Structure formats: C-alpha cells, structure tokens
Amino acid sequence: MFKPEQQSGVWYPFKMATTKIVLFTSKVLNNGESPILMRVIHKRKINYISLGYACQVEQWNKEACRLRRNFRGYQAKNRVLASLEDRAQGILDEMKRLNKPFTFPLFEEQFRGDTKSCTVYEFFELRIGEIHKSNTKRTYRQTKNALFKFAPNTHLMFADINYPFLKKFETHLLNNGMSGGGVHFYMRTLRAVVNEAINRGYFKRELYPFANQFNKNGYSIGHLNSVASPRALSEADMERIKAFPVEQYPHLKKSVQYFLFSYYARGINFTDMAQLRWTDLYNGRL
C-alpha cells in the first residue's frame, strides 16, 4: 500500500495517474502502420485509449511523442495530439482538485465524452491540414478564428453548438460590423465542419443544430443574405471611373486599374485577384 499524497494541505487518497501519447508498435496494421494511443498508467496498471491516428515507425518521434516531418499533414495532427495531451492533463488536474478517486473507466468517459474524442478547434485544425486548395484552407482558418474570438474555450465541443449558440454567434458577428453576407460566409463554413464531424462520428446526428428536413426548428442561414445592404454604383458613376484621368493623377492609376479589372472580371474579389497567376489564363480567357 502507498500512503496518501499531500499537496497544498489537501490529502489525496490515491496516487495520481500519468498519461503519455505513444506509438503502439506491438500492433501493426495491414498497411504497415501502428496505432497512436494515449497510454494511461495508474498503480502500475496500464490502459490505452485510441486516438484515431496511425503511422509508420520511422514517422514517429519517440522522444517528442509527435509525428515527424515525413508524415503528411504532420503539423495539424501534432496540434491535435498536443490538444489531446492538454485535455488528459486537465481531467487529471480536475480529479485532483475535486479529490476524486481515479478509475480508468471514469477517466476514459471524461476523455472521450459521448462521442469520439475531438474538440471543435481540434477538428478545424484536422480539416485545415487535410485541405489542399489554398482558398478553402483560408476560409476554414478565417472561420475558426472568428469562432474563437466569440468562444475562446479550447475545450469547446460540438455538443456545445446548438441553436442558442449559433444565434449568439450571429449577433456577435453583426455587432462587430459584419454584413449579413459575411455572417452567411462563416455560418456556411461552420455548417460544413459540423456535417463532416457527424460523418466521422465526432458529433451525434440527432443533435444537429442547423435547419434541415429533419430539424425544421434548427438554425437557418437563409435569412442572412437579406441582412446585407449592398451599395451599388450608378451607371453614371461607373462611366466616370472608366474615364478617370489617370495621367493627371498618376498616384491613383493602379487603384483605378485594379477596381476596373475587378469590375470587368465579373466582380472578382481583391483577395482572389491578388492570387491570380499567368497560368490562370487559358486561350486568352481567365
């Protein structure tokens, strides 16, 4: 028997467990990879929790407990692993604070939750690491950053995203000067993330917060476009811009040219325009 621990004047009736992310090389999958697991040790007993990742031995840094650079998308997945480490330690710290006896089932239940283990921001990072198109990757990153400004809780779970949450997020964005179209942009991306989380088992389908044929009372993004108040130029104003005397105001020449290019390119936004390359021209057409 070991004696109770004493820290800061509080007696703990158990020795605190330890956790570590490891590559479980004792098991080799058909593709030659081994699973990455959360190892939990308590009273010399060991338990493992699957994290849903696997890699080759040469792709694993044993000392750092992280994926090496030769693993595709290693940065995003390492951020997820770091978040899982933080979550495991947070659960242990909370058990210690509340003086709860440690048990493997209790720890795993809290670690996993009702679904597979992944917070909203961890899943965002996972998707960003999987996406190859720069524009789509940027869209997901912008949405994640906007959501984090509204809900800066690193342990935000998909179950926390419900109708009231989405309405408050909408109000937050509108109150910070965003147009209805801009809110629509973020909500549409968040909806795509939620849909993919459901497909992968990170969120229960019956808790889906957005409106669809099965959830008529869910949050709808259809009204957001009507919130926008576009300000159109008159035809006369447009003709004045086309005839602008750039020779008299050479410092404004590029600004006028960029604006007209966007106009003639059917309203291409400035971010996409800045990323255009000569390879985007095919037979003289953009």
Image (tube, rainbow, N blue to C red):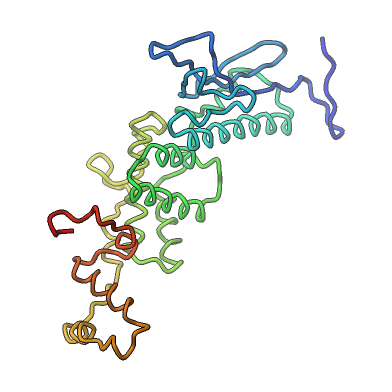
- Seen as rendered, the residue at the extreme right is 9
Drawn side of residue 182 relative to residue 4, left or right: left
Residue 52 vertical position relative to residue 214 in the rendered view, above or below: above
Residue in the image at 23% along x and 67% along y: 267
Residue in the image at 34% along x and 36% along y: 196
Count of picture labels: 0
Q: Nearer the viewer, residue 169 or 154?
A: 154
- In the rendered image, residue 189, in percent from the top left (x then y), is placed at 34, 49
Q: Nearer the viewer, residue 24 or 153?
A: 24
Residue 144 vertical position relative to residue 38 in the rendered view, above or below: below
Residue in the image at 36% along x and 59% along y: 183
Q: Quadrant of residue 83?
A: top right
- In the rendered image, residue 48, in percent from the top left (x then y), is placed at 57, 16
Q: Quadrant of residue 179?
A: bottom left
Drawn side of residue 133 relative to residue 34, left or right: left
Residue 23 vertical position relative to residue 78 in the rendered view, above or below: above
Q: Nearer the viewer, residue 13 or 73?
A: 73
- In the rendered image, residue 228, in percent from the top left (x then y), is placed at 30, 68
Residue in the image at 23% along x and 83% along y: 241
- Seen as rendered, the residue at the extreme left is 283
- In the rendered image, residue 154, in percent from the top left (x then y), is placed at 55, 43
- Seen as rendered, the residue at the extreme bottom is 248
Q: Quadrant of the N terminus?
A: top right
Drawn side of residue 281 relative to residue 186, left or right: left
Residue 27 vertical position relative to residue 133 in the rendered view, above or below: above
Q: Quadrant of the C terminus?
A: bottom left
